[in-house]
Amino acid sequence: MELTRRHALAGATAIAATPLLPSAPAKAAAPVADKQAPSFYRYKVGDIQVTVVADGKFTFPLEENFVTNAKKQEVNAALEKAFLPRDVFTIYFAPLVINTGGKLVVVDTGLGPASNVNSKGANGQFAANLVAAGFDPKAVDMVVISHFHPDHVNGLLAADGAPAFPNAEVLVPATEWKFWMDDGEMSRAPAGRMQGLFKSNRATFDAGLKRKVTPYEWGKEVAPGLLAVETIGHTPGHTSYVLSSGAGKVFIQSDVTNNPCLFAPHPGWHGFFDQDADIAEKTRRRIYDMVVAEKLQVQGFHYPFPGLGNIEKDGSGYRVIPAPWNPTI
């Protein structure tokens, strides 16, 4: 639009005629918010609707042995390359709710209510965000567990110790179940983290669920459209999934990597949380080569929210390209 001389003169006259207003300090219209909106994100895979429900994050000081086969200065360099601060590391958590049209399926359950209290709300958000996303825990038909680490199974129980999904069938990988429920394996577990994991899992599955679970095998559908895929190394029975409907397909990678800013560009790095790091590395390379070749989108439990992305080969490693946020479903 062209601004004519007449328009300019008219504007100047109007400004001159405006009475001077007393100066006053600006005031905020509302108090400053102290929390984010509930975090959930929906997308479609064919006719199946996926809702990513955030469980929050955990930030902690970066220890020398966090990556067991890389120096801390190398890890810090990778963090800086990803525009992240040095000397701290953040892990994100994002369970899924899959609506197949006939079944409502939860995949993994987050850190649970105790962690929500202990972290002052930084994580353990899944239960609250699930309700905010419009889901009733009593309406969940199936809960599918990928492996038995606290950030995946502790949300199976409510704050009072009762099942958080009282009407759901709980499905667990058969190999994972066999390992963690084996008294001999528990007796041989090294002191510290591994003994703690056995104790925590027994509290969840023995005391909480009374062992009311259904073991499942790899290579079979555990829910409509949800194929279980062996991705061992992180744990003995660690499982990922391919979700398919019509022409749509997404690879749900569970913990093939943790936060990808480190373990996608450096697939040979071994995180201290991988039970068999050598096998976990082989699995990571095998799976990422597969998703690159098949051009599968990947849903990452520990990716920054909402965790949906694409993988491309990048030198000796991989690069994760986040999928664009879609404001419609």
Image (spheres, rainbow, N blue to C red):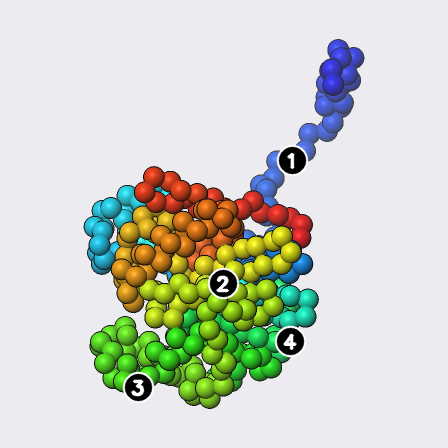
Identity of the residue drawn at 41% across and 55% down = 287
Q: Which residue is mark 2?
A: 241
The label shown at residue 22 is 1
SS of the residue under disc 1: loop
Residue furthest out toward the top = 5
Query: Disc 3 marks which amino acid?
Result: Asp
Identity of the residue drawn at 46% across and 50% down = 291
Q: Nearer the viewer, mark 3 or mark 1?
A: 3
In contact (CB < 8 Å): disc 3 and disc 4: no
Query: Disc 2 marks which amino acid?
Result: Tyr
Mark before the other along the chain sequence, 3 or 1: 1
Q: Nearer the viewer, mark 3 or mark 4?
A: 3
SS of the residue under disc 3: helix
Identity of the residue drawn at 28% across and 47% down = 76
Query: Disc 4 marks which amino acid?
Result: Ala
Is 156 left, or right, of 277 in this rendering? right
In contact (CB < 8 Å): disc 1 and disc 4: no
CA distance for labels 1 and 2: 65 Å
Q: Which residue is mark 3?
A: 183
Q: Residues within 10 Å of mark 3 (few under 14, many from 20)?
A: few
Relative to 5, residue 131 above or below? below
Residue 271 image offset from top left, x and y in percent: 29, 59
CA distance for labels 2 and 4: 23 Å
Q: Which residue is mark 4?
A: 139
